[in-house]
Image (cartoon, rainbow, N blue to C red):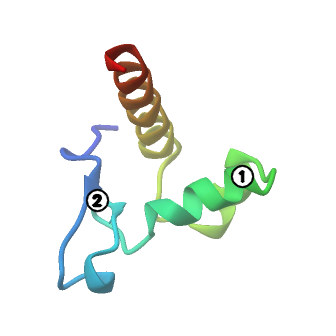
């Protein structure tokens, strides 16, 4: 499966500018809320079938890369 580029979309016409998984109306914040609450990736994917496993993992990897880059710059 080919991942969308960009992985996350922000548009004032979609959920008032809330960042969503590209091609869906699923807020990225919902994903992080699930993980923060201790839910599994599988639970998130069950509740949001419009998001593929590959897309969710790519968003996590992107967040990890951004976090590591910002911590090294500090």
Residue at the farthest front position: 74
- The residue lying at 69 percent from left, 50 percent from top is 35
- The residue lying at 20 percent from left, 46 percent from top is 6
Q: Is residue 59 left or right of residue 11?
A: right
Q: Nearer the viewer, residue 35 or 58?
A: 35
Labels 1, 2: front one: 1
Q: Is residue 34 visible?
A: yes
Q: Is residue 7 left or right of residue 32?
A: left
Which quadrant: the C terminus? top left
- Residue 65 picture location, percent across and down: 39, 24
Figure quadrant of residue 47: bottom right
Figure quadrant of residue 43: bottom right
Distance, label 1 to label 2, CA atoms, is: 22 Å
Q: Which mark is residue 7?
A: none
Q: Secondary structure at mark 2?
A: loop
Number of numbered discs overlaid on the protein picture: 2
Figure quadrant of residue 69: top left
Mark 1 — residue?
Answer: 36
Mark 2 surroundings within 10 Å by alpha-carbon count, few (fewer than 14), some (14 through 19), many (20 or more): some
Residue 36 vertical position relative to residue 67 in the rendered view, above or below = below
């Amino acid at each position: 499966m080919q991942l969308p580029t960009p992985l996350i979309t922000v548009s004032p016409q979609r959920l008032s500018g809330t960042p969503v998984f590209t091609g869906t109306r699923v807020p990225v914040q919902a994903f992080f809320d699930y993980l923060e609450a201790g839910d599994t990736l599988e639970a998130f994917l069950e509740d949001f079938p419009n998001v593929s496993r590959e897309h969710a993992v790519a968003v996590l990897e992107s967040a990890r890369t951004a976090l590591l880059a910002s911590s090294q710059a500090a």
